[in-house]
Amino acid sequence: MPVTVTRTTVTTTMSSSGLGSPTIVGSPRVLTQPLGLLRLLQLVSTCVAFSLVASVGAWTGPMGNWSMFTWCFCFSVTLIILIVELGGLQVRFPLSWRNFPITYACYAALFCLSSSIIYPTTYVQFLSHGRSRDHAIAATAFSCIACIAYATEVAWTRARPGEITGYMATVPGLLKVLETFVACIIFAFISDPVLYQHQSALEWCVAVYAICFILAAVAILLNLGDCTNVLPIAFPTFLSGLALISVIFYATALVLWPLYQFDQRHGGQPRRQMDVSCSRSHTYYVCFWDRRLAVAILTGINLLAYLADLVYSARLVFVRV
């Protein structure tokens, strides 16, 4: 779904032929362009990161597994993007090429950022001095480089005034990526039902996270598949309704989750010392109280993201042609 960005509005044009994306002839010169060089940096940095860790087997536990998955996944998809551009295969790619690269780059930046924080704080610091620790530290450094490279691509390719681009390159589109990513982190922290099954209010919060995640994911998939016209309602109406519902839902979760998790009158634990699970000393374990706090903070972050999404979505103008 190509879009034209002006100073305060985004005019969206949708063609029935579905051939809005430009045809780009493949050439090795793609690799000598600034964006091509940036993607080569992404490829090399993620490859070096997972190679360093794999060579010494330094990825034990869920946090290490997540970091290894992040680097391998980002390397693989970046390689696919380079092959597609070298071969000029954009029009044959099953997803919208106007929307896919920047959507992936935004996710990859967030993935590498999470690994650059999680891996050293939950794994590397507990390694004894030696070859494994040195490799792990170096892998963390290359993960940071990859994160910066992906973030730079997002900054370079996002929508600007007067450009014809995809919806995912606009601020609301990028916010959708952030919203779904934060929701996935929340799901990881609340993976143990003990955290919420004892209170109906907390179960409602979990339902909020799930509903809003699904709606945002649907919006992303519709744009990646260039099939926004399959909705029974107009896509602009869907986006506005999604943002408004999510703001209302997350506002209730921001009130209820801390209230029932940290207020003693509602069965909560206001201090970390009151949680028996936090007294355990385990390298890869995050205690229940820390998880509750993390979810409360992430709920606030996502509420702000949805508020910004609502404001920016109200400034979009969609024109069907």
Image (tube, rainbow, N blue to C red):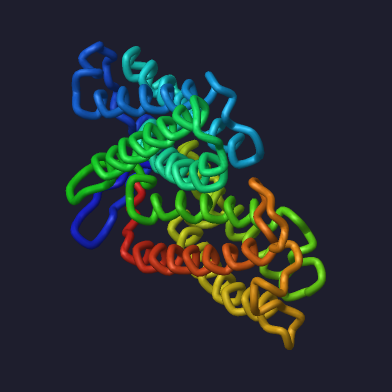
Nearest to the observer: residue 289 or residue 212: 289
At which x and y percent is residue 305?
A: 43, 63
Q: Residue at x 21, y 48 (%)?
A: 160
Q: Is residue 20 above or below residue 210?
A: above
At which x and y percent is residue 16?
A: 41, 37
Nearest to the observer: residue 305 or residue 132: 132
Question: How many callouts does the rendering have?
Answer: 0
At which x and y percent is residue 1?
A: 38, 42
Q: Is residue 161 left or right of residue 149?
A: left
Q: Is residue 11 left or right of residue 123?
A: left
Q: Is residue 17 visible?
A: no
* Quadrant (top left/top right/bottom left/bottom right) for the C terminus: top left
Q: Is residue 109 visible?
A: yes
Q: Is residue 69 left or right of residue 109?
A: right
Q: Residue at x 48, y 46 (%)?
A: 114
Which image quadrant for residue 246?
A: bottom right
Q: Is residue 189 above or below residue 264?
A: above
Q: Residue furthest right?
A: 198
Q: Is residue 113 above or below residue 202?
A: above
Q: Residue at x 69, y 63 (%)?
A: 278
Q: Is residue 165 above or below residue 261?
A: above
Q: Residue at x 19, y 23 (%)?
A: 33
At which x and y percent is residue 21?
A: 33, 31
Which image quadrant for residue 34?
A: top left
Q: Residue furthest bottom?
A: 265
Which image quadrant for residue 248?
A: bottom right
